[in-house]
Image (tube, rainbow, N blue to C red):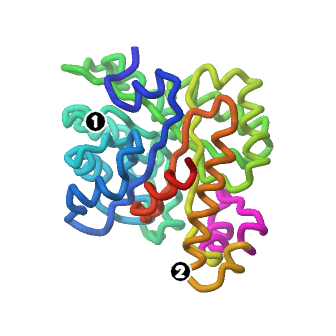
Amino acid sequence: MMPDSKLAAKLAGKDFIFTAEYLPEVATITPEKDNFIKSFGTVVTAVNAADNHYGVAMSSLAASIALGRAGIEPVFQIVTRDRNRIAIQSDMLGAAYLGIKNVLCLSGFHQTLIGEPESANVFDIDSVQLIGMVKKMNEGKLLAGKTIKGKFDMLIGAAANPYTRPLELNVMRLAKKVAAGADFIQTQAIFDITLFKQWFEAIRVEGLLNKTAIIAGVLPLKSSLQAKELSEAHTDYIIPDSIVKRLQAAGNEQNQKKEGLAIAAETIKSLKSITGLRGIHILSGGYEDAVSGIIEAAA
């Protein structure tokens, strides 16, 4: 039985879906309701509320509630970097009480990569264990066995990096997440379609496409400088030289941003042709107002 969420209902059907990302700010306010709706339009099924993705920001839980109040179904992101299992289960119970129905289980970037090198990490459990913990909570129990009073019902998501090699270990890691209870997988940003297809075919052969829904990540690049910085800072981002050169050739900052949007739309068109892919997750990177335009351009 799937949880009672719009995202769960879409994944249970055959529609090709779009999800997007909202990056909370270092702020105690959120954009007004109309701005949220205008930014994401009506074409996304759900929007992820990032969890201290690039350093300290308003909590994912608060951002999820803000999205819900704006009429947008949230995906509550939670990373194991910052909390032990006690705090995570407490936050999950709170999220369920507040009506949140979707969660994305992540380990999180190391604190040195988000500008917080003096912070201590936690990593009491990893993302696979987190998925298993939420699944157990869906069955009405905490990790220690205590019964949950009331309904706890979450659609469980996880992340995957199609570029991690060796491919066999990559697929094995994904299989563990699926076995632990991941209902859907959102990938890291895809720039190299050929490498993504290799990974996708490997998980098809493994039979994982029948057990979970794969949603491919697409990131609209703002400049060639951003592309280079991402490649240097994160091995998650394999950006072909052809894309960097294309951005450079566009000229000034404004033109490079437009070219980045065009590249994102073209990437979506290519990905949509892959049989078995269930959707696209637009990693807005704080560029939320571009989401609707990218989807329209990729139609």
Q: Secondary structure at mark 1?
A: loop
Q: Which residue is pictured at 39% across the width and 37% down the height?
A: 103
- Of residues 16 and 176, the one nearer the viewer is 16
In the rendered view, does 215 fall on the left or right side of 103? right
Q: Quadrant of residue 200?
A: top right
Mark 2: which amino acid?
Answer: Gln
Image quadrant occupied by the N terminus: top left
Q: Is residue 235 above or below residue 188?
A: below
Residue mark closest to the camera, 1 vs 2 = 2
Q: Which residues are magenta?
A: 226-245
Q: Which residue is pictured at 43% across the width and 55% down the height?
A: 292
Q: Which residue is pictured at 32% across the width and 35% down the height?
A: 89
Q: Which residue is pictured at 35% across the width and 24% down the height?
A: 137
Instruction: Residue 224 in the image: state x and y as whole percent.
Output: 65, 76
Categorize mark 2 by other alpha carbons within 10 Å: few (<14), some (14-19), many (20+).
few
Q: Is residue 76 above or below residue 249?
A: above
Residue farthest to the top, as pictured? 1
Q: Does residue 229 belong to the magenta stretch?
A: yes
The residue pinned by badge 2 equals: 254
Instruction: Residue 272 in the image: state x and y as whole percent.
Output: 63, 40
Q: Secondary structure at mark 2?
A: helix
Instruction: Residue 41 in the image: state x and y as whole percent.
Output: 36, 51
In the rendered view, does 4 fall on the left or right side of 182? left
Mark 1: which amino acid?
Answer: Ile
The residue pinned by badge 1 equals: 100
| Gap in angstroms between the C-alphas marked 1 and 2 | 38 Å
- Of residues 220 and 208, the one nearer the viewer is 220
